[in-house]
């Protein structure tokens, strides 16, 4: 789909009409910090929030509310006649909309989808409300914490994938002539989110999506740091005494599955990532 690149100085009709059209039939993905923030705002535990209001193993907000705009279902957090019930804890995608955020070669780009400003379709009256610069809008939406969390999870995703590489490349598994591990990494890139979540299983899924971190945590970097430590402890516990190639294969596939599940929540293209990681491993073996 075509995207329109934005600069922070661009002036756009960014004052919301509050008609709630974009809270219907939309796609809102969640990283673990966003799930934690939503649960806190809803006064649920993260586990309760995940089980009640999300799908795809906690990586997507459920849109199963009353049908509204264009007969599309409302977000599970949308209250008719009121609006968002978790406004202060809403995820980055909701803070940014109608703007999107992409990262290319470590650079952040703000964009909107399509050639036409997205709000015009459902809320044409938005042009009569005050216009704002993109920078002012982001500040008003308090996106900073959520952008930091998103970037930290991108890094954690790569660290988890690195663990899968190490289990495959540095343990003798690849050299043993293993032909099963890389094809399975690739399969996981194409699997539906539900199948991938089932493959990972509850123990890893809970550690990834609803880590046991105190409700007092308000700093996203601190949160992701604690989360990284919990995942490292889990990996140490599970992977420190592997003996057979089958065990090494299972471990490499499991941790790659966890990395890909996280990729799902941060909106990365799992298929492209899995292919890229397989190619990287193959190149490494070729050039050894
Ligand atoms: S489409 Fe735009 S103006 Fe309409 S409710 Fe959503 S953000 Fe507000
Ligand atoms: S979380 Fe709130 S702002 Fe986001 S889609 Fe749901 S109701 Fe709308």
Image (tube, rainbow, N blue to C red):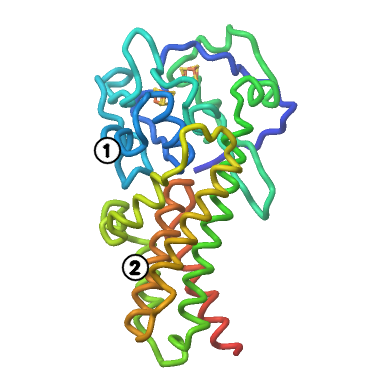
Q: Give coordinates of residue 247: x percent, y percent.
A: 34, 79
| Residue at image coords 25%, 28% | 64
Q: Is mark 1 within 8 Å of ligand 2?
A: no
Considering depth in this image, is 35 or 64 the residue closer to the camera? 35
Q: Which residue is mark 1?
A: 51
Above or below, comparing residue 228 to residue 110 in the picture: below
Q: Which residue is mark 2?
A: 187
Considering depth in this image, is 104 or 112 the residue closer to the camera? 104
Q: Give coordinates of residue 66: x percent, y percent.
A: 24, 19
Q: Which element is circle 2 on? A: helix
Considering depth in this image, is 151 or 229 the residue closer to the camera? 229
Above or below, comparing residue 176 to residue 117 in the picture: below
Q: Give coordinates of residue 116: x percent, y percent.
A: 54, 28
| Quadrant location, ligand no. 2 | top left
Marks 1, 2: nearer the viewer: 1
Mark 1–mark 2 CB contact (< 8 Å): no
State the residue lying farthest toward the right: 9
| Residue at image coords 44%, 75% | 240
């Amino acid at each position: 789909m075509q995207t329109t690149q934005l600069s922070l100085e661009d002036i756009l009709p960014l004052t919301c009409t509050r008609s709630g059209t974009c809270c219907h039939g939309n796609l809102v993905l969640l990283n673990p910090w966003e799930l934690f923030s939503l649960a806190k705002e809803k006064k649920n535990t993260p586990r309760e929030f995940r089980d009640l209001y999300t799908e795809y193993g906690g990586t997507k907000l459920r849109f199963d509310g009353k049908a509204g705009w264009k007969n599309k279902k409302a977000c599970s957090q949308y209250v008719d006649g009121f609006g968002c019930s978790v406004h202060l804890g809403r995820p980055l995608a909701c803070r940014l909309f109608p703007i999107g955020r992409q990262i290319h070669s470590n650079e952040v780009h703000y964009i909107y989808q399509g050639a036409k400003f997205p709000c015009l379709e459902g809320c044409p009256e938005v042009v009569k409300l005050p216009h704002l610069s993109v920078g002012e809008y982001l500040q008003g939406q308090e996106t900073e914490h959520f952008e930091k969390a998103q970037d930290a999870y991108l890094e954690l995703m790569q660290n988890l994938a690195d663990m899968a590489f190490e289990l495959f490349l540095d343990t003798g598994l690849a050299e043993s002539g293993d032909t099963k591990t890389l094809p399975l990494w690739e399969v996981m890139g194409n699997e539906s989110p539900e199948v991938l979540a089932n493959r990972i299983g509850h123990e890893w899924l809970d550690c990834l999506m609803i880590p046991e971190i105190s409700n007092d945590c308000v700093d996203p970097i601190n949160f992701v740091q604690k989360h990284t430590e919990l995942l490292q402890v889990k990996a140490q516990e599970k992977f420190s005494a592997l003996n057979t190639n089958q065990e090494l294969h299972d471990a490499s596939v499991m941790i790659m599955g966890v990395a890909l599940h996280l990729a799902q929540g941060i909106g990365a293209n799992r298929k492209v990532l899995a292919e890229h990681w397989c190619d990287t491993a193959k190149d490494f073996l070729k050039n050894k």
